[in-house]
Image (spheres, rainbow, N blue to C red):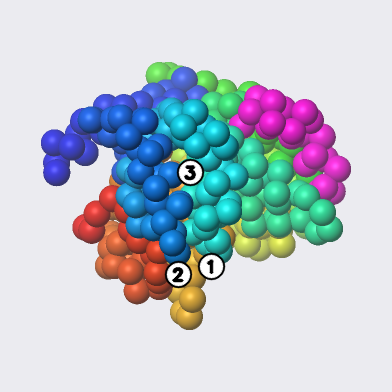
């Protein structure tokens, strides 16, 4: 297992200019035969009562690229679109999860963003999670895909759907080019930013939110990690406590999400999964969104953080808190127990 995770750790993903390792639980199937998979899915869909397990076994153990090839083959043999066929054959949370897997990570994030801003009322939780937890490269890709899919700039939709400081923060994150991490540690700049954050918040009456937004949206992640450490020299409260004291509502949630992701992005997702599966019944929407969007990115590492933080495995938690075919699909994406 250690060798596998070492190998997976060599697949890389950019965080600014820095190379961030990838820790997926879903990797390409080695002996892959798209026409065989497509034929098996067609048989499973035609089976009386639908053979969900076969569909789960195939689609949760193939990479995005491979699922795309399966969809192409499926259309060739069944003369219909795989997404439409899955919609007709499946229902409930399993349907949502499987349709999510048929998109690339960026397409999935883009469609989740669109859904969070559609119709009456905004789903701020989804908006905050995606915009505040994705790194600059991921956001760039989401913006491109969003425009392709919906013929509209994501910035326009965000601006039309949110207001005030919340809109300013989200737009700054989506539009600003974050500084590239540097090998040179600029202690003067670290000190200056830490002092500015303190003077814009805890030190004064009222909060100068604009200063917070510009520092949090422009600086590189390694730089910000050092700024938050330095901040403790100036403020009687750490950065998270300061956020809780200074801002409320969506602004508080957004800044906390940013800080948690700058500190340890996988721990942020692990805690979010834990919260979504507390008490009676899982918050399926949140669980599905994280499992689908992270399974080819860093879910292996999220699993490790989950076990470390919550003293039980993500696999066990899913097994206890979900049921049926939906549970089987989640466990398969989880990729094993720890």
Asked whether disc 1 touches disc 2, contact meaning CB atoms under 8 Å apart, the reply is yes
> Considering the numbered disc 1 on the image, is that residue within a helix, a strand or a loop?
loop
Q: Judge from the rendering whether residue 302 lies leftward or rightward of residue 192; answer left or right.
A: left
For mark 2, what is the residue?
277
Q: Is residue 62 above or below residue 124?
A: above
Whether tag 1 and tag 3 are in contact, CB under 8 A, the answer is: no
| Residue in view at x 80 percent, y 39 percent | 157
Q: Nearer the viewer, residue 256 or 207?
A: 256
In the picture, residue 107 is in which quadrant? top right
Does label 1 or label 2 sit earlier along the sequence?
Answer: 2
- Please identify the dominant SS of the magenta region: helix
* Residue hosting label 3: 101
- Residue at point 35% right, 74% down? 320
- The correct choice, above or below, for 119 with respect to 169 in the image is below
In the rendered image of this protein, does residue 215 appear above or below residue 239?
Answer: above
Measured Cα–Cα span from mark 1 to mark 3: 19 Å
SS at mark 3 in the image? helix
């Amino acid at each position: 297992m250690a060798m596998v995770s070492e190998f997976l750790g060599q697949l890389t993903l950019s965080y600014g200019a820095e190379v961030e390792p990838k820790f997926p639980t879903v990797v390409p199937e080695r002996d892959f035969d798209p026409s065989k998979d497509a034929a098996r899915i067609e048989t499973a869909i035609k089976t009386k009562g639908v053979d969900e397990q076969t569909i789960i076994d195939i689609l949760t153990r193939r990479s995005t690229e491979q699922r795309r090839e399966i969809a192409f083959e499926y259309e060739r043999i069944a003369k219909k679109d795989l997404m439409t066929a899955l919609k007709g054959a499946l229902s409930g949370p399993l349907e949502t999860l499987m349709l999510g897997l048929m998109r690339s990570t960026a397409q999935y994030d883009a469609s989740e963003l669109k859904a969070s801003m559609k119709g009456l009322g905004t789903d701020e939780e989804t908006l905050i999670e995606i915009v505040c937890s994705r790194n600059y490269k991921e956001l760039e890709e989401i913006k491109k895909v969003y425009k392709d899919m919906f013929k509209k700039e994501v910035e326009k939709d965000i601006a039309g759907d949110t207001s005030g400081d919340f809109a300013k923060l989200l737009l700054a994150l989506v539009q600003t080019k974050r500084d590239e991490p540097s090998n040179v540690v600029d202690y003067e700049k670290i000190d200056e930013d830490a002092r500015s954050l303190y003077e814009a918040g805890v030190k004064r009456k009222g909060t100068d939110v604009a200063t917070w937004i510009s520092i949090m949206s422009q600086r590189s992640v390694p730089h910000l990690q050092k700024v938050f450490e330095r901040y403790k020299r100036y403020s009687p409260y750490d950065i998270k406590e300061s956020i809780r004291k200074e801002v409320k509502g969506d602004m508080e949630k957004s800044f906390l999400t940013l800080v948690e992701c700058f500190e340890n992005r996988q721990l942020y997702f692990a805690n979010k999964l834990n919260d979504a599966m507390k008490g009676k019944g899982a918050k399926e929407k949140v669980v599905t969104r994280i499992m689908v969007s992270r399974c080819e990115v860093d879910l292996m590492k999220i699993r490790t953080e989950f076990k470390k933080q919550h003293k039980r495995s993500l696999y066990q938690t899913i097994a206890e808190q979900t049921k049926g075919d939906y549970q089987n699909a989640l466990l398969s994406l989880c990729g094993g127990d720890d």
